[in-house]
Image: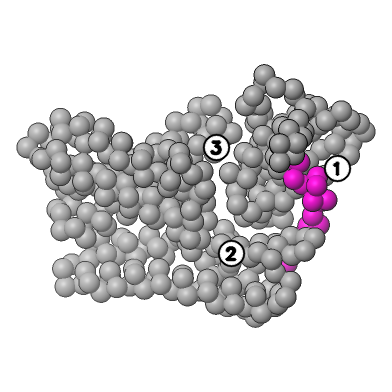
């Protein structure tokens, strides 16, 4: 979610806890700053898209990161609000950060809550990164007079419940239309409409990407992508590019094409389909001897090229080498 949404969430949490919405109130300021602070990982953008997106919603969104940053920031805020209790500032700041990571779980990008022990991004996938109805419901709660406060809170909770219900209805419709063919189904809010849901259906031999509008009966198919051979897919997935991309997205597809003596593997993030194309890609190119000649991350556009460094240059540059060793050991 964007910083404005997180700031609004912070104000709503501060009001919910009964604190005064004022810059002079240590609790409110601690909660609001805490609700925005995890996105400080934007500093990684200084080193490019690859470094930023690799680390985004990792350290600063994890349980460990929340506790450490709350301790550090509470010491700073204590210098400003000298009369406030340090322990209480810590708890208020931590509450804001928990609200941040908690609501990030509601969208499809997710967060690495258990980093560094687990690199998996946890996600519920019921809200888009920017949801105008979600923000309006929060603002309504913040500015509502005491007699209307409970009603606006009920409306906000009801909207979250409605999104959960919408997802279950769409899941049921898709399972019904693809009965017997589905090996795995991922569903997330579409980036192009509040009532549209983007789905990724894994079938034997292919991936199907499409959209279901809950207000319409029909299902729209965007792409049908044939899978490459299982052995080749395992090899490229074991490469350092494949490992990075599997951490970046839980739903991917690999294309393979030959250009002269070069074999080109294109990794596609299937989650975000906009204006006839997928949003994020990675590219791995190898020569006839399987030596890596190009490895790049291409976020937002294929023309936005970010080189992916080999994490272990001491080993042979053949990207199959580690995979071969792995097969020999096992």
Range shown magenta: 220-236
The Cα–Cα distance between marks 3 and 1, rounded to whole angstroms, is 26 Å
User: Is residue 323 visible to us here?
Assistant: no
The Cα–Cα distance between marks 2 and 3, rounded to whole angstroms, is 23 Å
Tell me, yes or no, whether the highlighted magenta stretch contains residue 228: yes
Give left or right: position of 151 versus 272: left
| Position of residue 170 measured from the top left corner of the image (x, y, whole percent) | 58, 74
Could you tell me which quadrant the C terminus lies in?
A: top right
Tell me, yes or no, whether the highlighted magenta stretch contains residue 5: no
According to the image, label 3 marks what residue?
54
Q: Secondary structure at mark 2?
A: strand
Nearer-N-terminus badge (1/2): 2
Question: Can you tell which quarter of the image residue 321 is in?
Answer: top right
For the residue carrying disc 1, how many other residues have a C-alpha within 10 Å: few (<14), some (14-19), or many (20+)? few
According to the image, label 1 marks what residue?
257
Question: Which residue is at the front of the view, 288 or 153?
Answer: 288
Q: Secondary structure at mark 1?
A: strand
Nearer-N-terminus badge (2/3): 3
According to the image, label 2 marks what residue?
187
């Amino acid at each position: 979610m964007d910083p404005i949404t997180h700031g609004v969430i912070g104000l709503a949490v501060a009001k919910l806890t009964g604190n005064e919405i004022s810059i002079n109130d240590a609790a409110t300021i601690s909660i609001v700053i805490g609700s925005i602070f995890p996105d400080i990982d934007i500093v990684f953008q200084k080193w490019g898209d690859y470094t930023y997106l690799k680390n985004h919603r990792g350290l600063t969104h994890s349980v460990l990161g929340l506790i450490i940053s709350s301790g550090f920031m509470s010491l700073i805020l204590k210098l400003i609000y000298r009369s406030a209790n340090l322990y209480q500032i810590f708890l208020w700041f931590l509450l804001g950060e928990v609200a941040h990571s908690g609501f990030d779980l509601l969208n499809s990008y997710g967060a690495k809550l258990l980093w560094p022990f687990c690199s998996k991004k946890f996600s519920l996938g019921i809200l888009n990164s920017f949801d105008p109805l979600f923000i309006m419901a929060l603002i309504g709660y913040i500015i509502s007079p005491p007699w209307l406060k409970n009603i606006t809170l009920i409306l906000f909770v009801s909207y979250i419940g409605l999104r959960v219900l919408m997802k279950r209805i769409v899941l049921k419709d898709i399972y019904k239309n693809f009965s017997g063919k589905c090996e795995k189904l991922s569903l997330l809010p579409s980036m192009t409409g509040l009532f549209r849901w983007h789905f990724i259906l894994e079938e034997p031999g292919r991936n199907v990407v499409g959209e279901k509008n809950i207000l319409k009966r029909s299902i729209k198919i965007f792409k049908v992508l044939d899978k490459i051979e299982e052995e080749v897919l395992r090899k490229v997935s074991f490469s350092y590019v494949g490992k990075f991309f599997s951490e970046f997205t839980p739903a991917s597809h690999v294309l393979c094409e030959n250009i002269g003596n070069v074999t080109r593997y294109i990794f596609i993030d299937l989650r975000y389909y906009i204006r006839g194309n997928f949003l994020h890609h990675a590219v791995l190119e190898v020569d006839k001897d399987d030596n890596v000649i190009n490895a790049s991350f291409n976020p937002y556009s294929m023309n936005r090229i970010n080189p992916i460094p080999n994490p272990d240059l001491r080993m042979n540059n053949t990207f199959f080498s580690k995979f071969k060793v792995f097969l020999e050991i096992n």
